[in-house]
Image: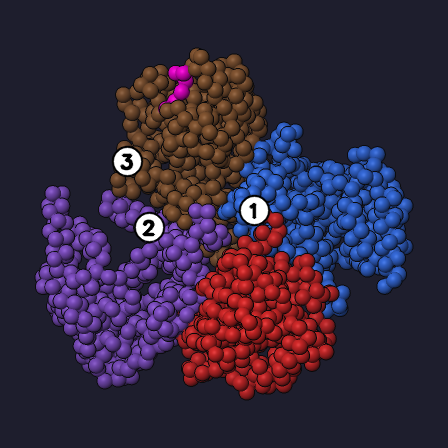
Chain colours: A red, B brown, C purple, D blue
Amino acid sequence: MALVLNEEQNLLQQTARSFVQGKAPVEALRKLRDERDETGFSRELWKEMTDLGWAGVAVPEEYGGFELGYVGLGLILEECGRMLTASPLVSTVLLGATAVALGGSEEQKNSILPAIIGGEQILTLALDETPHHAPTKISMTAEKSAEGFVLNGKKEFVMDGHVADKFIVAARTSGKSGEEKGISLFLVDADNPGVAAERLSMVDSRNAAKVTFKNVKVSSGALLGELDKGFPLLEKVMDIGRIGLAAEMLGMAQEAFQRTLEYLKERKQFGVLIGSFQALQHRAVVMFCEIELCKSMVLKALSAIDEKDEKNLPILASATKAKMGETLKLVSNEAIQMFAGIGMTDEHEIGFFLKRARVAQQIFGDQSYHLDRFASLNGY
Amino acid sequence: MALVLNEEQNLLQQTARSFVQGKAPVEALRKLRDERDETGFSRELWKEMTDLGWAGVAVPEEYGGFELGYVGLGLILEECGRMLTASPLVSTVLLGATAVALGGSEEQKNSILPAIIGGEQILTLALDETPHHAPTKISMTAEKSAEGFVLNGKKEFVMDGHVADKFIVAARTSGKSGEEKGISLFLVDADNPGVAAERLSMVDSRNAAKVTFKNVKVSSGALLGELDKGFPLLEKVMDIGRIGLAAEMLGMAQEAFQRTLEYLKERKQFGVLIGSFQALQHRAVVMFCEIELCKSMVLKALSAIDEKDEKNLPILASATKAKMGETLKLVSNEAIQMFAGIGMTDEHEIGFFLKRARVAQQIFGDQSYHLDRFASLNGY
Amino acid sequence: MPDLEKFRAETRAWLEANCPESMRQPARSSEEYYWGGRNGKFASEDQKIWFERMLEKRWIAPHWPSEYGGGGLSKDENKILLEEMRRLGCRPPHTNFGITMLGPVLLKYGSEEQKREHIPKILRGEIRWCQGYSEPGAGSDLAGLSCKAEPDGDDYIINGQKIWTSYAEKADWIFNLVRTDTTVQKQKGISFVLIDMATPGVSTRPIKLISGNSPFCETFFDNVRVPKSNLLGKENEGWTYAKYLLSHEREMISGIGDQGVTKTLGELAVERIGKQDGKLADSVLRPEIAKLEMNALAFQLTVERAKDQAKAGQGLGDVASMFKYYGTELNKNRHELIISVAGMEGLVWEGEEYNEGYTARTWLRTKGNSIEGGTSEIQLNVIAKRVLGLPS
Amino acid sequence: MPDLEKFRAETRAWLEANCPESMRQPARSSEEYYWGGRNGKFASEDQKIWFERMLEKRWIAPHWPSEYGGGGLSKDENKILLEEMRRLGCRPPHTNFGITMLGPVLLKYGSEEQKREHIPKILRGEIRWCQGYSEPGAGSDLAGLSCKAEPDGDDYIINGQKIWTSYAEKADWIFNLVRTDTTVQKQKGISFVLIDMATPGVSTRPIKLISGNSPFCETFFDNVRVPKSNLLGKENEGWTYAKYLLSHEREMISGIGDQGVTKTLGELAVERIGKQDGKLADSVLRPEIAKLEMNALAFQLTVERAKDQAKAGQGLGDVASMFKYYGTELNKNRHELIISVAGMEGLVWEGEEYNEGYTARTWLRTKGNSIEGGTSEIQLNVIAKRVLGLPS
């Protein structure tokens, strides 16, 4: 696929942009935060998003989707990133629908995917058990029982964990923490007895929760994918998640940069526009270059998902998440420094970008994690 | 000791500066290079340096030295660094005299130190066997024989190796490559049968040689320090060497920066002085700051040698060598970029600083080596 | 020298006997310090005891002249006292911009009456001060201020607005830069005025920061009448006093973040991330942490070197010009690494289990270090010109 | 599409049959390329065969119009040919600034006579060209040139000096920027003139670089008489043509260093340093190498994206402005890492065992990448203004 958007994709991007900027600008996130909204996003907004078909953008037609692919979903995520829009798009669509579509049985697909597309179910992935992303460090257990499995364990920082209807849970059916083998995935309903979610208040005002599973009984039909061999499926879902998240981060970086650039063109100091200072100009160009590089990587990585380029997907996912993380860190820090005093105030929106940046960098592995993985995948 | 020079030290620095700038400016190195001088330094110059007492600056009085300490030797090295002066100061004095003074028997000290101080002997350390500094990776062997030891092996990139009168050789008397235990140090005369040195042509036009030892027989009196337990002595000599080398690098960095700064104040582009461009100004200040930091580290590390602060010496040596390496890399690269076209020509002297910089960075471990060691010494 | 050693021994013994245990723990927030003032409250009985004992000992400002209530200690003695306090971990008994900022200016440029009026009140914690320097829209161009003072008999009438006034809503008095001459070059028409904030027409509004805290205010002056006797030094020469104060402030800010740091970054990383094969398990973060700690060591040694130089009578030298710039950038980097080391836990905003978001809030607060008291860019400009002599 | 696939298959078969084995190895120095010219010599029989076969095939400049001796290939065909050549590792059969630099300008702005006169000679390797742009003291201010051409009947008389003329001492003709009007704004008085270097009064002096090589010369013009018919385009409009050429040159330079790179940096590092516990043994270099390779991948994808955009009719876009800057900085970093990876071995200057210092010399040569063809600083200025619209 050429690294350029086609007409359909351009249209989707335009639609997404005007929708998000109209209905869910940064101000909306501030409102959710200041009102201590219990859901953490607007259910009305999510209804409108799913009405637009966004939850089915990357889902195959046979399950009610629209087959615009992950490039399409990436464009929507990017636009949401620009406005820091809070919604279950990542948890439910990027992760949930992807995991079910890739690993689910026909029955699972037929029951879950349409519910996701229709906006009736919130799904999420319950994976990490420590403050640092470590997908093989799974201690949570799923023991075989007469009717199915019994789950016990604790998951940390689960996205939308306190409002999810269903969890995709990574648990250990054999082996020990640190091993890839022995990890299995399960679909667990939130109202299943023994499931308890405690919401956390995060710096980015987005949803995360600690979820505990205490003797949670599920049927054998709850298994998603193969027993003991859930890791390759999980890895693929994560790689897609990393790339989708990078698309969201790309939107954030572009918007933060754009706002900074505008500020440089209007703010005066010592009687001249600060954008005329050469040192700031050069630093702005460095940001511009890094963002352009990220654009190419994100587009290439999204295309690789659609092209089912299994061979290059892991390397592209790690390179993209790491590069996007570095760039977003740079841009969010430079933005605050260039906005200076006003950027330090809560009243100004630029700080929201800095706050969301670090959380997005952490999810599914920060730069350290992915540079290490990138090096290993490249054989060094 | 306060981090400030006393009167005696200030005087020594002034003397060294005027001597080096008068007798051995960068032009002298160019001459040695262009004339393909076989010695690689001027023996007349070395005679003058030793007449000034430089070879005995850090040697105890009882062996004919002047007890001005390593702070004193560091000041001389710094001034030599400014002019890229080629001499056996590092090989013979910083390494050779230090090793003998620290590890030698009374007999060895009495016979060798006065000869070094008098400029009659060139010593050097024959240590590394690979292109990367790795002091425990020693495969060269010294086997016990009736009369003493028989040495076999090869040493790479030995400073002043082709003109040395005596080598301090690290060889294995037990254990295997990678182990600290089993390394012993030997004093080996260059005219001993079986010793052969092949000079290498290096980018910095300074001396390095490949030295082979083939069935070289030495008496048991050739052992420097303890059998099998030479590593702690070697490590200390290397740490002192690293700090002294950092002093030389500090001189280089200051001189390269000074020349660049002067160029920024005289070179015009588009009708204005390039030193008025804010982006270049900020980059110049960054260099200034890093050099100031290095000055403090080098002085502190040199003082730590004189104060026999054994506890902090390794950490200070690694921090200083790594920081100085980073700074010199930055300054030498920025210098070339700021001198632009003229800096790329062999005719201009600034390129000599770039060339010497990378060699000095490598000797006794580059930034990678020392950051790793610094982290390990700090317990992480 | 034996005198100083004796002083050290006595000081140590006195501190050990008199500093309450709880006052030897690092403070987690500015609220844990005693700020004094008309509405000042002690956060604990220990805090009160500690303040009163130090006040009695005249060690609230130990090196100020004793005639105004200072401790009258020599430089060497003062250094020893600070070293011993640091050794024990003693908190400062009283925090007040009157001590750290206004005091030195007042002692140097104030009239005898002003010194006798204000200094004892500062030391006794009766009056809490704040600083009126920055204005909206002026930013780094501090001298471009427009808050004006017009003479009216024996008074000035002050109108205008200040921003970034630290804790103004809790302060009693403000030292304020005002414009008294608009016809000359901007630096030459500025005066330095002391204003009681209880005067009619003074009002404040806190500014909430990205860290969620509100250490700063906007302060408004609406026809505020101030006696001319509250002018510090001479009219229109306030810029000189302001710069003298700023140079003190910059040194102070570059030290920010070192307070209360008990663990090294490396130790923190090992605790949070663990080791593998004897090295920090995150092999990518490890060299970044090592670089930061190497630079922090180099910076600390450089501050030491500057002090040693000054002590040797060679002046602080050019090197001191970089402290504000380098120190604040270093501190920002340190906190970026701290949140990397903490992972998701470092990004929690509230909750007792997460220390109410202390890690995240501190990280966010450090972003201001390279802005307040002169941005990093301003520092770089100044060093380029004044120290390196680069042309304009 | 099937046509293109057929073309690809035929091209591949032809190259496999006709490109000698030794011409499929990466060249280690510029001398291993065939540069042509009056004194041009083939370095080997294979080089001669390869050149002659490609000449006969009209693939010396495959996408130039066939009426002047070019191959007349479409853009797509040309791309396929280049891809297939890269796949096999085929060296370019002929290297000549007449092809890479002058050709595009000549084809766009030259007169019919000029095209018929010069292009076939370039293709046949009869005339080797060099570029006369920079002048001593002008540096980045290219338009500030002073080498002047004064009219004298049907001729110009040229006086002045050029610097950084690549391989001028081996070239036959030079395309030279001269000043033909000193009374107007500097960009408006420049003309673009073609000069036979055999003309009396032209002389050259090689400049030795820090890499030890002398790819550049100073070139002197002392009352050199050149017919006015050698003017390209219009008098005083040379700056337009010069900029057109420069934009081509910048793209070319940003690709420098990718030629002949057969091993990735990671592979090289493993070979030179070895592994420990499955990872590169140097744990500090490892993330630096990973960052470089990550950036190189991102850069390569960005060049691809720009091409795809252009192909889709959207133009090269703003992104192309960064290629020269980013590409050259990347290449410098790559070579810094290569010498780190090679250790002391990478710093040897001479000796067959050390490939005559190839690693060190190449590293030194890359320092010029961010200087020649417009310094990185100039690129940053230009992007800031033209692309980001930042004010002057």
| Range covered by the magenta-colored residues | B220-225
Which chain is indicated by disc 1? D
- Nearest to the observer: residue D113 or residue A361: A361
What label does residue C300 carry, if any?
Answer: 2
Which chain is indicated by disc 3? B
Cα distance between the residues tagged 3 and 1: 42 Å
Q: Secondary structure at mark 2?
A: helix
Q: Residue at x 71, y 65 (%)?
A: A307
- Nearest to the observer: residue D186 or residue D242: D242
Q: Where's residue C174, x and y in %?
A: 24, 74
Above or below for C111 versus B41 = below
Disc 1 versus disc 2: nearer the observer: 1
Residue bearing the label numbered 1: D278
Q: Quadrant of the N terminus of chain C?
A: top left
Q: Quadrant of the C terminus of chain C?
A: bottom left
Residue B14 lies in what quarter of the image? Answer: top left
